[in-house]
Image: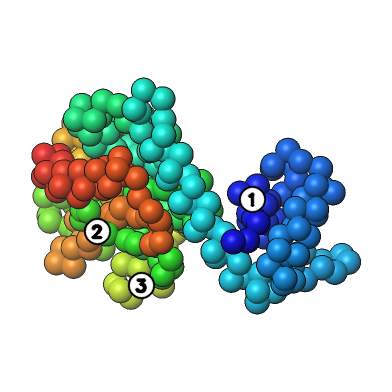
Amino acid sequence: MLDISIRQLEVFVATAEYCSFTKAAEDLHLTQSTVSMHIRTLEEVLDACLIERGARKKIILTEEGKRAYSIAKDILARVDALQEHRTDGGEELLRIGTSTVPAQYLLPKLLSGFLKKHSRVKYILRRGDSEHILECIRKGEVRIGLTGYKNGDRSLIFQEIARDHLVLITENNEAFRAMQAEEKTGKDLLDLPMIAREESSGTQHAADTFIQKLGVKELNIIARMDNPESIKASVAEGIGVSIISDLAASAEVKAGKLIAFPFKPQTEERKLYIVWPKEALLTSAELKFIQYVKSQTSAILLSE
C-alpha cells in the first residue's frame, strides 16, 4: 500500500486549485517550503511528476497531475463524509450553498421543516449568485447547492425541484394600472428603463435567454443590482422596471406595492435545482435533506 497522508493530498489539491505554492501555503497556514516538501514527497511515492514547474508562470498540472488531482479530490470528499458521520452527540452537519432567490424565498421554509424532523442536524450556509455556488460545490466548500441555473458541468448532478415564472414588474401607479387593465404584457414594456440582476445570476441567465427568444436585441439597462429586495424597492420608487422571478415578486404584488406583467402568451419558466457533486459519497443527513427538498418544494411554491 502506498504511504500517502491526507495532509499531502490536501496540500496538493490546494496548490493545484490556487496554481500557486504561495497561496496554498497561506490558505493552509504552512510555509512555502513545507508545501513544496509535501508535494515532492507525494511525487516520489507515486513515482510521477505532478506539476510542471517553471519561472514566472502559474503552476500547471501534468497529465499525471490532473489524474491525481481528480482522485485526491474524491478521497478528501470521502474523508469529509466520514468526519461528518463522527460528530459529537450524534450531530450531523450540512454544508449548503444557495443562490439569491432560493435563499430568500425557499430555503427558510425548507430548513424549518427539515430541522423539526431532524433535530440533531446542524448546518453551515453560504450565499452567492448561481455561478458562485456551483464553483463552491466544485471546490468542496459546500456539499449541496440550491440554484436557479444549470450549466454543462458533468461533475455535478442537477435535479429540478421547482419551476418559477419570469414577470416584468413596475411601480403601482395610474399609468401602469391602465396598462394592466388593457392587458398589456411584459413584452410591451421592454423599451422602458430596466433594472437588471448581476450577469452571473440564475434569474438573469433565464431573462437574457428569454429576451433573445423574443427577438429583442438590446434593453435599456440603467442599473444592475445583486439583490431582488433592492430591485423591488427601486422599482416601487419608479426608478425603472425589472424582469424578476414571480416567486420573488409575489408578496409585493399581493400587497399592492408593485404590478406584475406576465409574458403571455409566451410565459417563460425558469427552473430551480438542487445540486451536488456526482462522485460525492453523501452522508445520511445530506441524503435525507435532498429527499426532503425534492418532496417539499412543489408544495411550497403552490402555497405562495
Q: Residue furthest right?
A: 55
Label 2 crowd bin: few (<14), some (14–19), many (20+), radius 10 Å: some
Amino acid carrying mark 1 in the image: Ser
Q: Is residue 226 visible?
A: no
Task: Tell me the distance, in whole angstroms, between the alpha carbons under discs 2 and 3.
Answer: 23 Å
Q: Earlier in the sequence, mark 1 or mark 2?
A: 1
Residue 33 in picture, x, y percent from top left:
84, 49
Amino acid carrying mark 2 in the image: Glu
Amino acid carrying mark 3 in the image: Gln
| Residue 160 numbered tag | 2
Q: Is residue 78 visible?
A: yes
Query: What kind of element bears circle 1?
Result: loop
Q: Earlier in the sequence, mark 1 or mark 3?
A: 1
| Residue 212 numbered tag | 3
Q: Quadrant of residue 68?
A: bottom right
Residue 72 in picture, x, y percent from top left:
57, 59
Task: Tell me the distance, in whole angstroms, between the alpha carbons under discs 1 and 3.
Answer: 52 Å
| Residue 5 numbered tag | 1
Q: Quadrant of residue 73?
A: bottom right
Tell me the quarter of the image containing the C terminus. Answer: top left
**Which residue is at a point 35% across and 55% down the rendered structure image?**
275
